[in-house]
Image (spheres, helix red, strand yellow):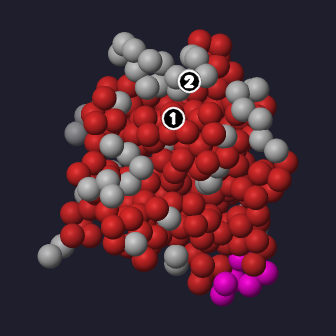
């Protein structure tokens, strides 16, 4: 059976398929973990420890010896994405109650969902798109995007906007595994390769554990707001990223558009933050479902929009080049006769 190939055909499938399986277990057999206990219960309830290992391995993959062009491009996209997510959180906090929207089309939407969907780019999707439509340096610009992985950036934004307060020790605890992995990966390239190989295999495991905290009814009721959130991520983050890529990073805007996605790993952030801030815990199921939907929507649309952008730019450049070429000199009268 070609299960892996079938999963790969689904945008973000490595995360979303196990998440849906976990949601099925939670919906139809909510006591399965306690019933089986031991390692089975560990897989079902082990979101935080699995994510801790994954976060450590992500840190190990960052190589500071990347070229200046790669770091410039990556840094521009990273900082722009963080600033836009901060502004979006600040605006949302003025209009959305702390406990989220309770009724109507946007029922279940919360500041937590908005922040965690907008502050983290799908690095794998970005690299794949730019390998096809960009330069080698642009494709390698995902090198710093791993810094967005995990809850740290979301915590910084929520804290800076006054939506939540995190004790300093919680910030240290959130980033420490990443920093240890980052340090080891840069001290020894063999360790970087060793831990780097663990990043993708761990995704289905924490996806399954996350799904075990979601009822399928929540996914159904959060579907439309999640789709709208996905469109919002592309529009709200995409426009500033395109401008930053063109005016600061020296690109043509394609890299900025390719970075306007929601990372699959962002699905884990509401649950992690909910563990730190108890008043956010009731928001976690709906926020997780919305971020997962936004991840799927952006994974489908971002490659299509980037391809259209590149083709449009190429057609415009070709037209400009044709208009700028000097007209052909007329054939002299004596040379016009055969």
Q: Quadrant of residue 208?
A: bottom left
| Residue occupying image coordinates x 60% and y 70% | 53
Badge number at residue 282: 1
Of all residues, the one furthest to the bottom in this rendering is 190
Q: Which residue is mark 2?
A: 99
Q: Is residue 67 magenta?
A: no
Q: In the rendering, at what x and y percent does residue 70 appear?
A: 68, 57
| Residue occupying image coordinates x 72% and y 32% | 164
**Callout 2 touching callout 1 (CB < 8 Å):** yes
Along the viewing direction, whichever of 229 and 311 lies nearer the viewer: 229
Q: In the rendering, at what x and y percent does residue 30 appear?
A: 32, 54
- Which part of the image, by quadrant, shows the C terminus? top left
Residue bounds of the magenta highlight? 185-191
Crowding at mark 1 (Cα within 10 Å: few <14, some 14-19, many 20+): few
Along the viewing direction, whichever of 19 and 138 lies nearer the viewer: 19
Of all residues, the one furthest to the right in this rendering is 168
Give the Cα distance between marks 2 and 1.
Answer: 8 Å
| Residue occupying image coordinates x 44% and y 54% | 210
Of all residues, the one furthest to the left in this rendering is 1
- Which part of the image, by quadrant, shows the N terminus? bottom left
Along the viewing direction, whichever of 158 and 252 lies nearer the viewer: 158
Q: Is residue 190 magenta?
A: yes
């Amino acid at each position: 059976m070609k299960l892996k190939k079938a999963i790969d055909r689904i945008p973000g499938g490595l995360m979303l398929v196990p998440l849906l399986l976990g949601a099925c277990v939670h919906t139809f057999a909510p006591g399965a973990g306690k019933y089986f206990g031991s390692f089975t219960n560990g897989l079902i309830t082990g979101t935080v420890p699995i994510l801790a290992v994954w976060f450590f391995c992500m840190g190990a993959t960052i190589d500071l010896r990347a070229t200046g062009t790669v770091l410039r491009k990556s840094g521009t996209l990273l900082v722009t994405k963080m600033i836009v997510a901060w502004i979006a959180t600040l605006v949302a906090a003025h209009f959305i109650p702390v406990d989220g929207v309770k009724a109507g089309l946007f029922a279940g939407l919360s500041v937590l969902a908005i922040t965690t969907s907008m502050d983290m780019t799908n690095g794998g999707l970005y690299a794949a798109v730019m390998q096809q439509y960009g330069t080698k340096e642009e494709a390698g610009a995902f090198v710093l995007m791993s810094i967005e992985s995990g809850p740290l950036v979301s915590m910084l934004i929520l804290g800076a906007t006054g939506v939540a307060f995190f004790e300093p020790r919680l910030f240290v605890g959130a980033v420490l595994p990443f920093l240890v992995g980052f340090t080891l990966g840069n001290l020894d390239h063999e360790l970087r390769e060793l831990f780097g190989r663990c990043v993708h295999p761990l995704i289905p495991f924490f996806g399954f554990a996350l799904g075990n905290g979601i009822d399928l009814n929540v996914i159904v009721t959060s579907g439309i707001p999640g789709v709208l959130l996905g469109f919002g991520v592309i529009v709200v983050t995409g426009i500033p990223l395109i401008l930053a890529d063109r005016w600061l990073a020296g690109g043509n805007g394609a890299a900025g558009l390719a970075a306007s996605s929601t990372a699959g790993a962002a699905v884990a952030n509401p649950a992690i933050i909910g563990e730190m801030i108890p008043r956010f815990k009731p928001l976690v199921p709906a926020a997780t479902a919305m971020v997962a939907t936004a991840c799927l929507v952006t994974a489908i649309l971002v490659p299509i929009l980037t391809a259209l952008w590149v083709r449009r730019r190429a057609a415009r450049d070709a037209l400009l080049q044709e208009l700028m070429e000097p007209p052909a000199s007329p054939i002299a009268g004596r040379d016009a006769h055969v």
